[in-house]
Amino acid sequence: MKSFQVVDFNAPLQEVDQPTPQPSGKQVLIKVKAAGVCHSDLHIWEGGYDLGHGRKPLSLKDRGVSLPRTMGHETVGEVVAFGPDVTDADKGGLKAGDIALAYPWLGCGKCPTCLAGDENMCAVKPNSLGVYCDGGYADHMTVPHPKYLLNLKGLDPLTAAPYACSGVTTYSALKKVESAFDTPIVIFGAGGLGLMALSLLKAMGGKGAIVVDIDARKREAAEKAGALASVDGKAPDALEQLVKKAGEPIRAVIDLVGNAATAQLGFDCLTKGGKLVIVGLFGGGAPWALPLIPIKAVTIQGSYVGNLRETQELLDLVREKKIAPIPVTPMPLGRANDALRELQKGNLIGRAVLTP
C-alpha cells in the first residue's frame, strides 16, 4: 500500500510503502478512489492553530494527534473486504464493489454524545479518520465499521469526496441559520466551502447569499455559482456595501474563514438578534467589544463539521435536488505535496482531489 504521511510538522509529506492492511473485527477495507484536500489538512500539516492575542498556538500534538499520520478525511473508496466480525445486519446492504463515501468524524463510540449520534462532538476520545487515525492520502484505507460507509449510488467519486467535510460542514452550518432563509444571508469565504454553501443554500430553500472574499477570482466564482452579490472584504467600505446589497437587515452570517477581520465584519453587519456562525479555523483572537454582544443581542455559535445523520441527509439532498458539484481539480496521489502548497497559496478554486 502506498500512502503519503505527515512525518514531521511543517515538513513535506513522505511517500511510504507498506503491506496493505487486512480488515479485522468490524473493519472494512476500501480501495481509495478520491481524497479531497481540505484546508483543515493544512492545520494538521502545520501542527496547530493560531489563537491570537499573543497566546501560544493550539498544538495538535497536545490535542492527541500523533505522527506519522496519513491525512485525508474526504475519502471515497470501493469496498474491497469486510472484517471477520461483520454481519449482514452491520453491512446494511453494502457489498464488495460498492463505491462509498467514508464518514470521518468518529468519536469513542461509547459516551452519551456518541450514542446520541453526535460522534463529531465527542470529547472523550476523538478518532477522526485522517486526523487521529490514518485517512485517505493512500491507495487503501480501513474504516472501523460499515455504518460509516455511505453508498454513493452513482454519484461521481471525484465530486462527491468533498461532501465528507466541506459538504456536511456547510450543510450543518446552514441548518443553524434556517430561520433566516427568507432574507439574504452573508457568507465569508468563496473557497471550496463557500461554493458548496451556495449550492446547498439554494437547494434548502434559502433566498440567497452575499459572499465576502478578498480574492477577485473567488468572488467571480461565487457569483457564477449563484451568489446574490459579492464584496471585497478588504474594501474600506465593505460594511456599507454589505448593508446596501442586502437591502434589508442581515440576520445571519456564516464565517467560513474564521479570522479576526472576518469575525469583526460579520458581527458588525448583523442586525439586532442576528446570528454569527463561525466555521473557519484560520485563527486569531476574538475581536468584538463585549458590551456590543448583549446590546445587539447577537448569538455567536461555533459549528464543527456534522454528524453521520446529516451526512446521509446531505447525500439524499444532492440526489433529490440534483445539486451541481463544486469545481474540483483532480491531482495524482503522488502530487499530494503540490496540492497542499497550492491550497496554502490560495491558488485553488473549489477543491483539489487526489486520485490514487
Image (cartoon, helix red, strand yellow):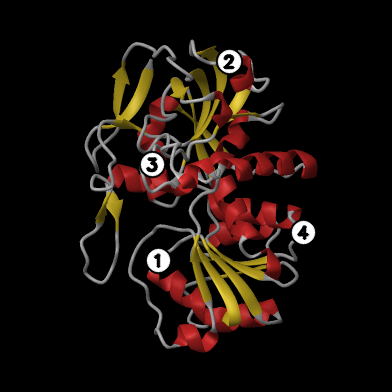
Q: Secondary structure at mark 1?
A: loop
Residue 202 x, y percent position in the rendering: 74, 56
**Dot 2, how many residues are within 10 Å of its Cα: few (below 14), some (14-19), or many (20+)?**
few
Q: Secondary structure at mark 4?
A: loop
Q: Observer-nearest residue: 81 or 17?
A: 81
Mark whose residue sits in front, 3 or 2: 2
Q: Residue at x 49, y 10 (%)?
A: 84
Q: Which mark is residue 126?
A: 3
Mark whose residue sits in front, 1 or 4: 4
> What is the C-alpha distance between the residues marked 3 and 2?
25 Å
Q: Residue at x 53, y 79 (%)?
A: 298
Residue 125 appears in the figure: yes
Q: Which numbered disc flags the more N-terminal residue, 3 or 2?
A: 2
Name the residue beneath numbered marker 2. Answer: 87
Which residue type does callout 1 highlight?
A: Asn
Q: Residue at x 37, y 29 (%)?
A: 134
